[in-house]
Image: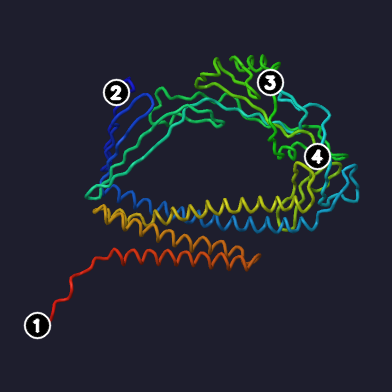
Amino acid sequence: MADDDDFQQSISDGGTDAAVDSADGDSVTETTETSWFSRLGRALVGVLIGIVLIVGGVTLLAWNEGRSVTAARSLTEGRGAAIDVDAAMPVAANEGRLVHVVGLAATGSDLTDPDFGVAAKALVIVRKVEMFQWEQHEETTTQKQVGGGEAKTKTYSYAKIWSARPIDSSGFRQPLNHSNPPFALPERTFAAKDATLGGFALREALLSSLAAIVPMAVDASVLPKIQAKLGRPATQIDNAVFVGVNAALPQIGDLRLSYTMAPVGNVTVVARQSGSGFAGYQTKAGDVIDTIRTGRLSIGEVFADLEQENAILTWLIRGGGTLATLVGFVLILAPLSVFADFLPILGSIVGFGAFLMALSLTLVVAPLVIAIAWFAFRPLLAVTILVVGVVIAGALRWLASSRRRIAAPVGPPPAQART
């Protein structure tokens, strides 16, 4: 097998030529040339992908608005149905009702990571695991050519990083000497099995949703067990444990363990009273309310948090659906700019106009889908969203029209009539 410094490859397929210009131990540079006909063919295939993306984006937007409306209605219903209950002892008359309980959550014993014996007086413990791995970075530059062709230069570089997620190195452009081992230890969440809130029992599934953000110290006495289980030296560094030979010079595959916890203390639960514990409360609107929060919160504060979370999730999904729709329209209109790329300057102008058109279409379609879903629940907001979308789309169309007028060539003056 050739050394890294001799790494060379060329590909010819359907008007596409690729070659690795240079390579070393940490980077590879590859130049790819694509003919105008190949680019046009790919753009036409992209039209089909664009249609799928638009359908998917619109579907996601419609589903998200339905989900958001259901959540909003459920939270409104829950806010009105929730009652304050003393944590000291469940009352049979409240069975099946949505209750709001505040008090001190406690456990009868320390919570322990069974793999290594790390323990604390806590409701939840989260074991975070990071591995020292190779990561590939890709940079691309594109140069258009006369005749509609295109040259792309990609540079793949490699760096060593600590990462809590496995990085698959099998797809690296230059996997030789950049191989990551399997992730040796999973991240895990442990919840107390015997936790109580006054006279109520707290089930593990509910506790697991608590935010475990308090850093947790690891006692040096657990290091031999970590070392024996993982088969490598373990060293305590601040609140973390380094698993490897030299913490100052980590090697690929070395691990770093750390723990956070949700300590025993005051919590607030809003859920259905079920016997001596809690279960999910099914609203008539369709959602289930079953939540626990750190601290002593009122009913209003809990539902304000839930409404904010619903709003954030709604906007994140809206962003994803809108982006998918935009990319879909860009792909559908891409053949126009590729066709015009026979002259690179003309292709750039057409490409910019096509992008503005795609953006205009997206800013009409996405708000229209959102508005339709909201008409039944918040008609004023629906009308506002629709109007804003139409105004923005109109402004973009005016801008595109202005650019075309400016770019239009000025013809010679009309000839004077002879007398």
Given residues 282 and 3, the one toward you in this image is: 3
Q: Quadrant of residue 259?
A: top right
Q: Report the label total.
A: 4
| 1 or 3: tag closer to the N-terminus | 3
The residue carrying mark 3 is 116
Q: Report whether 209 appears left or right of 324.
A: right
Q: Measure the alpha-carbon separation of dots 1 and 4.
A: 98 Å
Give the colour scheme of this rendering: rainbow
Q: Where residue 203 sits: x, y (%)?
A: 78, 38
Q: Report whether 272 appears left or right of 396.
A: right
Numbered disc in front, either 1 or 4: 1
| 4 or 3: tag closer to the N-terminus | 3
Q: Quadrant of residue 87?
A: top right
SS label for mark 1 = loop
Q: Measure the alpha-carbon separation of dots 1 and 3.
A: 102 Å
The residue carrying mark 2 is 6
**Mark 2 surroundings within 10 Å by alpha-carbon count, few (fewer than 14), some (14 through 19), many (20 or more):** few
Q: Measure the alpha-carbon separation of dots 4 and 3.
A: 28 Å
> Residue at left 71%, top 40%?
209
Q: Amino acid at mark 2?
A: Asp
Numbered disc in front, either 2 or 4: 4
Q: Measure the alpha-carbon separation of dots 2 and 4.
A: 64 Å
The residue carrying mark 1 is 418
| 2 or 3: tag closer to the N-terminus | 2
**Mark 3 surroundings within 10 Å by alpha-carbon count, few (fewer than 14), some (14 through 19), many (20 or more):** some
Q: Amino acid at mark 1?
A: Arg
| 1 or 4: tag closer to the N-terminus | 4
Q: Which mark is residue 266?
A: 4
